[in-house]
Structure formats: structure tokens, C-alpha cells
Image: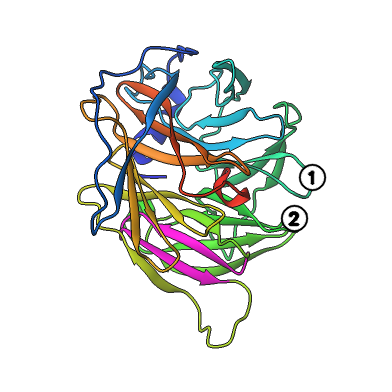
């Protein structure tokens, strides 16, 4: 999540109707050749795939997040700023380029989506109300999974990640609206009965993803433009979280994060329709961006990479609407590059 959310959440109650479109027109584009490798990595140009949403009249914005591919190959996406009654969870048949409404309600501002390996349900983080909810895969049977305070504070849950056992790890952006480094990483057991703060003092905690071996978490901090690493399995010499990557993004900021089968990190950018890719040692491998000349797109929030394949779906939003762009990832997709 990102600052755009602070503006949008204040007006969620007064949002007008959302005009949902399936395979709409794409913004103006012009061709762009892939850049040659350099010290900042090679350039990868993402291709426009389809438009999912148009801008909400009441706020002048739409914001797609949390792309996750289900077992049926369909892509689930959330629209953070969708008004009551309009689609807040959408599902895309990527073969037919057809999008349909899966879920809506009167209050939630959902910022991420992930299928649980424990019960198979779809879990959503409600940033506006500090809750984690779950749905049946078809969007029915809404359940409140976790609504409590954690160590005296209600969460501002942004992204989510599951471990192999189905325990949930949440990037809690607590303190974002105050401009204070109060963000946390919270672990919630798979039954929703117990919550533990694993890290605090983070600067607007945003993306969260396990590494390939589930030994640690990569965490992006929006207002410091950095990626931190937090071990969650004890290892010799481990003393806790450390700054792993400082992201040189200019006016853009670090959003959600994903990890492929080779352990590469895909860091989405708020304020630029692009992602930067690093290896596990912090070397910048590539920059994924929309074609030169594209107008009306401001942020690339997240990515889903096809499990076992390299086709990637990147969520991109701005005044032109909410879009999916595709590109070829550097390595195959795994759970850590599919949702969150």
C-alpha cells in the first residue's frame, strides 16, 4: 500500500458507482526496445494485457492490488478504492480476457489477497478496519478471521504471506498516517487465535514475502525506500532484521514485493508504473516498465507469476484506469510470487 490510500480511505463511504469494464482500450503507447544491460540491470518492457477498472467518480482514482492465480488458472485481483456495492474482488479468465465480480460489501478497503495452503480459502486484508477476512474461493461465505488489537493497537494490515503450515504473516502499516516508524510484522496462527509481533519500528510496512526456503521474510518499507530481511528460522550468526536493499527510486516509493523460484525480489513502485528486480544479495538485475509514451498510469502495485511458468501479470493503476500488464519473469513463479 501507499500514500494514495490515505486519500482514498477518507472518502470510501461516499464513493460513487464503479463502471467495470472487461477488455477495454489501453492507454496511448509507443514502441520501446529493451535496454541493454547496465549497472542498474536490463530493461524489460511489459505489454498491455487488459483494462479491469475505470476511475471512480467520487475519488478520481482506482487502485488494483493483490493479484493471485488460483488452481483453476484464473487471476483474482482486489480494487482498494471500490465503493460499496461495486466489485471489490474481481476474477479474470486470462485465456478469454473476461473479468467478473466475485465479492463486494459496504465497508471494506481490501489491499491484498492470498489463498491459504491450510484451508484453501481466499484471505483479504482490510486496511480501513484493521481486519483480516476470508472468503470461499468463489467469493461466498465471508468470515472474519482476525479483528483484535495486537499489543494494544489495531493493525493497519497491508500485505499478507502464508508459511507452509498456513500461519499468516501481515505487514502492519501502523503509524503511516502519523508519519512515524511504528510499522510492524505480525504473525497470526492459522486458527486466528494468537497474534505475535515479530518486528516493529518499521517505516510504513508494505510488502511482505517469504524467501524461497521459508527461512526469512523480505519486507518493504514505503517511506524509507528500503527492503529489510527478517529471519524467522534460527540460523547461526542471525541477530534479527537488517536492511537488505536500499531502493534508488527517485520520487517513487517501495510498494508490494514478490519472490520467484530463483530467489529474485520483484519490488513494485508507487509513483512509477514499474518494478525493480534484485537478486537475494541486492544486485539490481532488471527494471520492468510499461512502454514509453504510456500516459495516465502512476503505480505498479504487485505481480503474480504463473506457478511453474514465467508469465507475469502486473497490476498497474492511475487516472487511465486499472490495468493488467504482462512480461516474462526472470524465473518461474512459486507461492511467494503469487498473491500477497
Q: Do the CB atoms of the residues marked 1 and 2 lie less than 8 Å apart?
A: yes
Is residue 123 toward the left or the right of residue 16 in the image? Answer: right
Q: Position of residue 336 (x, y in %)?
A: 58, 52
Considering only vertical position in the picture, is 273 above or below 166?
above
Considering only vertical position in the picture, is 169 above or below 314?
below
Residue pointed to by mark 2: 190
**Residue 222 part of the magenta-drawn span:** yes
Q: At 48% across and 41% down in the image, what residue appears?
A: 303
Q: Position of residue 97 (x, y in %)?
A: 54, 16
Where on the picture, by quarter, is residue 115? top right
CA distance separating discs 1 and 2: 9 Å
Mark 1 / mark 2, whichever is N-terminal: 1
Q: At 48% across and 25% down in the image, what residue appears?
A: 82
Nearer the camera: disc 1 or disc 2:
1
Helix, strand or loop at label 2? It is: loop
Q: At 67% across and 34% down in the image, what residue appears?
A: 70
Residue pointed to by mark 1: 119
Instruction: Identify the magenta region.
Output: 214-231
Is residue 83 toward the left or the right of residue 176 in the image? Answer: right
Helix, strand or loop at label 1? It is: loop
Residue nearest the observer in this picture, 20 or 326: 326
Considering only vertical position in the picture, is 42 above or below 203?
above
Asked whether the viewer can see residue 188, the reply is yes
Crowding near pointer 1: few (<14 within 10 Å), some, many (20+)? Answer: few
Looking at this view, name the residue that lies furthest to the front: 36
Q: Position of residue 149 (x, y in %)?
A: 60, 57
* Image quarter of the N terminus: top left
Where on the picture, by quarter, is residue 192? bottom right
Amino acid at each position: 500500500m501507499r500514500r494514495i490510500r490515505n486519500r482514498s480511505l477518507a472518502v470510501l463511504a461516499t464513493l460513487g458507482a464503479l463502471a467495470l469494464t472487461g477488455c477495454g482500450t489501453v492507454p496511448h503507447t509507443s514502441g520501446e526496445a529493451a535496454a541493454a544491460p547496465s549497472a542498474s540491470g536490463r530493461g524489460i518492457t511489459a505489454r498491455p494485457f487488459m483494462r479491469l477498472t475505470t476511475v471512480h467518480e467520487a475519488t478520481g482514482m482506482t487502485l488494483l492490488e493483490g493479484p493471485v492465480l488460483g488452481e483453476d488458472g484464473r487471476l483474482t485481483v482486489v480494487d482498494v478504492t471500490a465503493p460499496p456495492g461495486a466489485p471489490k474482488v474481481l476474477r479474470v479468465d486470462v485465456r478469454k480476457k473476461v473479468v467478473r465480480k466475485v465479492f463486494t460489501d459496504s465497508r471494506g478497503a481490501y489491499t491484498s489477497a492470498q489463498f491459504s495452503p491450510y484451508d484453501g480459502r481466499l484471505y483479504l486484508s482490510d486496511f480501513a478496519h484493521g481486519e483480516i477476512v476470508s472468503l470461499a474461493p468463489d467469493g461466498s461465505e465471508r468470515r472474519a478471521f482476525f479483528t483484535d488489537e495486537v499489543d494494544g493497537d489495531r493493525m493497519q494490515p497491508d500485505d499478507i504471506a502464508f508459511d507452509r503450515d498456513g500461519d499468516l504473516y501481515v505487514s502492519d502499516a501502523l503509524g503511516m498516517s502519523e508519519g512515524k516508524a511504528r510499522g510492524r510484522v505480525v504473525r497470526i496462527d492459522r486458527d486466528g487465535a494468537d497474534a505475535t509481533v515479530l518486528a516493529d519500528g518499521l517505516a510504513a510496512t508494505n510488502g511482505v514475502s517469504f524467501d524461497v526456503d521459508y527461512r526469512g521474510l523480505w519486507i518493504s518499507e514505503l517511506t524509507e525506500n528500503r527492503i529489510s530481511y527478517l529471519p524467522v528460522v534460527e540460523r547461526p550468526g542471525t541477530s534479527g532484521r537488517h536492511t537488505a536493499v536500499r531502493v534508488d527510486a527517485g520520487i517513487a516509493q517501495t510498494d508490494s514485493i514478490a519472490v520467484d523460484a530463483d530467489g529474485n525480489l520483484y519490488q513494485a513502485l508507487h509513483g512509477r508504473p514499474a518494478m525493480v528486480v534484485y537478486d537475494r544479495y541486492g544486485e539490481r538485475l532488471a527494471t520492468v516498465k510499461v512502454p514509453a509514451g504510456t500516459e495516465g498510469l502512476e503505480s505498479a502495485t504487485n505481480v503474480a507469476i504463473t506457478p511453474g511458468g514465467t508469465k507475469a501479470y502486473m497490476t498497474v493503476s492511475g487516472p487511465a484506469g486499472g490495468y493488467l500488464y504482462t512480461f516474462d519473469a526472470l524465473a518461474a513463479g512459486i507461492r511467494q510470487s503469487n498473491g500477497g
